[in-house]
Image (cartoon, rainbow, N blue to C red):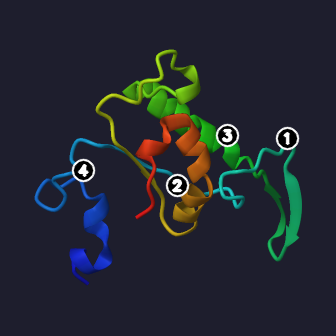
Amino acid sequence: MSILASGAMYVSRNPNLNPIMLVWIFAWLLYCDGTSLSGRLEEPIIVDGPLGEKMSYFVGSYIHDAAYTLLRDRFGLVSNSAKSDGDSIDNNNVVITGQSAGGLAMILHINWWGKHLGEMYISLA
């Protein structure tokens, strides 16, 4: 399959494939919690399975929050609610994505990201 057919060019950092997004802030959130990055359980759930008991933690919301904190601290992103002058993020375009269920998790959280980064920066392609 070609890179064009796979859609990989849309997230590529190669300037020949995707020159527009070369300087954009790009975050790929791995999906690993089973709750679309929304779980916040204080205690794990014990599940009986064919290999014995397993603990499931369902704490993806903390992963989601940590991703935002990292982007904020590393790239200087400021939430709209924290801005006193009402300005939008200066010269920053942000791509936050995932693969398969991780991509779906980002779509499910699009309003949260819009609230924190500014709706003018949020779009679904």
Q: Residue at x 19, y 58 (%)?
A: 18
Three-letter code for the amino acid on which mark 4 is drawn: Met
Q: Residue at x 69, y 44 (%)?
A: 61
Farthest top residue in view: 84
Q: Residue at x 48, y 59 (%)?
A: 98
The answer, for residue 7, to whether it is visible in the render is yes
- Which of disc 1 and disc 4 is earlier in sequence? 4
Q: Tell me the residue that label 4 is attached to.
A: 21
Farthest bottom residue in view: 1
Q: Is residue 43 left or right of residue 97?
A: right
Packing grade of label 2 (10 A; few <14, some 14-19, many >=20) is: some
| Mark 1, secondary structure of its residue | loop
Could you say which is closer to the camera, residue 76 or residue 124?
Answer: 124
**Callout 3–callout 2 Cβ contact below 8 Å:** no
| Mark 3, secondary structure of its residue | helix
- Distance, label 3 to label 1, CA atoms, is 11 Å
